[in-house]
């Protein structure tokens, strides 16, 4: 009796492991589909002359002609 009970528990553990792996893969796929993108422009940050971080590039300054 112990042998059949042991194999039954092993089968249950294997089923739980497979179910957990499948759910994890589904969550991963869902995150991938709903991601904001991750383009380079979205990841860039600019720092102005005062040290403030901004998502827009600073305005081009024209150098005075001497």
Image: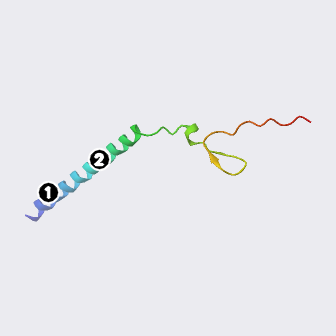
The quadrant of the image that shows the N terminus is bottom left
Residue at x 63%, y 48% (from the top left corner): 53
Residue at x 29%, y 47% (from the top left corner): 23
Residue 54: name its quadrant: top right
Question: Where residue 26 sits in the image (x, y, percent)?
Answer: 32, 43
Q: Which label belongs to residue 45? A: none
Element marked by disc 2: helix
Image check: 58 left or right of 38?
A: right
Question: Where residue 8 sits in the image (x, y, percent)?
Answer: 14, 57
Question: Where residue 10 sits in the image (x, y, percent)?
Answer: 19, 57
Q: Which label belongs to residue 8? A: 1
Q: Measure how far apart labels 2 and 1 are at the Cα level.
A: 23 Å
Element marked by disc 1: helix
Q: Which label belongs to residue 23? A: 2
Residue 55: name its quadrant: top right
The quadrant of the image that shows the C terminus is top right
Residue closest to the eye, 47 or 27: 47
């Amino acid at each position: 009796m112990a042998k059949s009970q042991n194999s039954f528990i092993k089968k249950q553990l294997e089923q739980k492991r497979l179910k957990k792996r499948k759910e994890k893969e589904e969550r991963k796929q869902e995150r991938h589909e709903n991601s904001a993108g991750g383009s380079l422009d979205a990841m860039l940050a600019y720092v102005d002359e005062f040290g403030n971080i901004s998502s827009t590039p600073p305005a081009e300054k024209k150098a005075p002609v001497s």
